Image: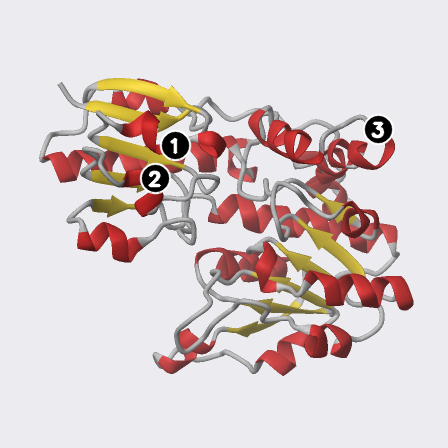
Amino acid sequence: MLTITLDENIPYAAEAFNTLGQTRLVAGRVMCNADLQDTDILVVRSVTKVNAQLLAGTSVRFVATATAGFDHIDPDYLREQGIGFARAPGCNAVSAAEYVLAAVSHWSLLRDKPLQGRSIGIIGHGNVGSRVRQLCEAQGLCCVANDPPLQAQGYSGLHSLEAALACDIVTLHVPFTRVGEYPTFRLLDAARVNRLRPGTLLLNTARGGVVEESALLTRLRSRADLDVVLDTWENEPAINLTMLQHTLLGTPHIAGYSLDGKVRGTEMVYRACCEFLQVQPCWQSPLPPTEPLPNTDTEDKRRDILHAYNIREDDRRMNALLYNKELDVSLHFDQLRKTYPVRREFSGLS
């Protein structure tokens, strides 16, 4: 019988993979080589670094990550060892895009800046960025999308990075890469951070290292003329509390954490594993029925959006770190992710 090791925080993973073999649940942040000695299939999230240190000497022959991003995976090592690999591209794209719309709606109401006619620079126009564009255009925003890799492939309607950074709102949706033709590590370095116009709203739901956090903090401390929404941070989970203190909204890497997106990711990697094993899938994701949305306000869709997803509650829970000095930063960050309340995508609400 196959032995399958799963991150304990992947929804419905045990139910799905029990149809393929014997499952074992392990905390992803502390998963180690000793946990995998007799493992055939490994299913992780972004908190587990999958490399030679984790896998050497084990019997793992297939790895899946129930996430869209895969910068926590060493694909070269997997190829060298002949280990199969799958991920879940786009599984949480809708959720992440709705997070951006909720954050923008909150900012718009708080700063009394109507969205109609304002500009938003969308850096990265893939699964998430393209959905952000659809949602924002529906709210009357002028979208300026930037994506050099897509532009090189002949994709039309894209703009320069400088044009995107000159918008009223700037939102990041790029993968985290250090090498290649279009590296994104510190894409917003000190020079670009300092070129942002006063009053700009900056959102990062990509990866912490895409923004040079120290440069951003320096600007916020000296001028305080930007509004910043951060869901991803450098050095997660040991985030910089001073950076949190200077955010308009700060959340613990949960932009893509809708129930719908999580279950979609589980189903995608389960089906990929079935394909690898050449067996017929027999598990179906059990998404609950749509739920009613209370307190709708037909006069202002921004308020409806915040009723559908109250992003301010996520910020409030995160900010407990600033007021309770007894909390351990890393433990609280991970606990917020582990115990994240059920959040439905807008399509799950009626």
Q: CA distance from mark 3 to mark 2?
A: 35 Å
Q: CA distance from mark 2 to mark 1?
A: 6 Å
Using the numbered discs, state the Cα–Cα distance from disc 3 to disc 1 in whole angstroms.
31 Å
Which kind of residue does numbered mark 3 sit on? Asn
Q: Which residue is mark 2?
A: 54
Query: Which residue is depicted at the point 59% across and 32% down?
Result: 337
Q: Position of residue 117 (x, y in %)?
A: 73, 70
Q: Are marks 2 and 1 in contact (CB under 8 Å)?
A: yes
Relative to the observer, which residue lies in front, 350 or 200? 200
Whether residue 209 sits left or right of residue 176 in the image: it is right
Q: Which residue is mark 1?
A: 32
Quarter location, residue 308 = top right
User: In the rendered view, does 99 fall on the left or right side of 299?
Assistant: left
Residue 324 numbered tag:
3
| Residue closest to the eye, 144 or 289 | 144
Amino acid type shown at disc 1: Cys
Secondary structure under the numbered disc 3 in the rendered image: loop
Number of residues whose C-alpha sits closer than 10 Å to that of mark 2, classed few (under 14), some (14–19) or many (20 or more): some
Q: Dot 1: few (<14), some (14–19), or many (≥20) neighbours within 10 Å? A: some
